[in-house]
Amino acid sequence: MRDKLDTVDHKILTLLSGDAQMPYTEVAKRAGISPGTVHMRTRKMKNMGVIKGATLSLDYSKMGYKMTVFLGIYLRESFLYKVVIEELSKIQEVVKIHHSTGKYDIFIKVHAKDSLHYRNLYQEAILTIEGIRGIESFISVEENMSRHINFEG
């Protein structure tokens, strides 16, 4: 198997990005290829590490998590990022962690039920992590788009 992606692979990725649960027969139909080709190509992309798995897209607000907050984290020392990331990953409400360049050392996304829940997370779980120097918080008022890159365009 080749280790490069071609237009057929990109078409498959674009279709699965829109609906990760789409049956291979439907992907094949829309891509104009056989289901066997979809299966082979998908397996190849999994082996390459391009496809890491399939995820659900959840509406957290319908599950009682009414707040989405992004936090820019400053570290006391930049070499502490691994330890801080490890501690942040233990907090169930932290859903994304990025080790970043620029203004912040780490940038995270958190879901909270309400402002009281967020305050408790912030004060009791996040601020107590050894190595954090400071934090800036950004409350999301609305998510307007979440998508993958369209590889066909």
Image (spheres, helix red, strand yellow):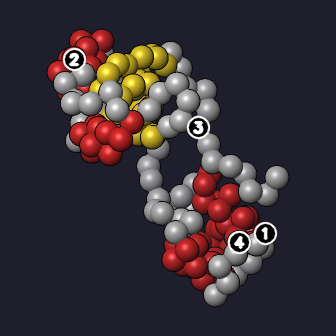
Q: Residue 5 carries which label?
A: 4
Residue 141's spot in the image, x, y percent? 50, 15
Q: Distance between the residues labelled 4 and 3?
A: 24 Å
User: Which kind of residue does numbered mark 3 sit on?
Assistant: Ser
Report whether 74 appears left or right of 93: right
Residue at 21 percent across and 30 percent down: it is: 130
Q: How far apart are marks 1 and 3 (CA)?
A: 23 Å
Label 3: how many Cα within 10 Å (few below 14, some 14–19, many 20+)? few
Q: Distance between the residues labelled 2 and 1?
A: 49 Å
The reply to whether discs 4 and 3 touch (Cβ–Cβ < 8 Å) is no
Residue 131, compared with residue 134, is above or below; it is below
Q: Which of marks 1 and 3 is nearer the N terminus?
A: 1
Q: Which mark is residue 123?
A: 2
Name the residue nearer the viewer: 35 or 11. 11
Q: Distance between the residues labelled 2 and 3?
A: 29 Å
The reply to whether discs 2 and 4 touch (Cβ–Cβ < 8 Å) is no
Residue 18, compared with residue 32, is above or below; it is above
Residue at 57 percent across and 66 percent down: it is: 50
Residue 59's spot in the image, x, y percent? 43, 34
Residue 60, compared with residue 46, is above or below; it is above
Residue at 72 percent across and 64 percent down: it is: 10
**What residue did someone put label 3 on?**
146
Q: Which mark is residue 7?
A: 1
User: Which kind of residue does numbered mark 2 sit on?
Assistant: Gln
User: Which kind of residue does numbered mark 4 sit on?
Assistant: Leu
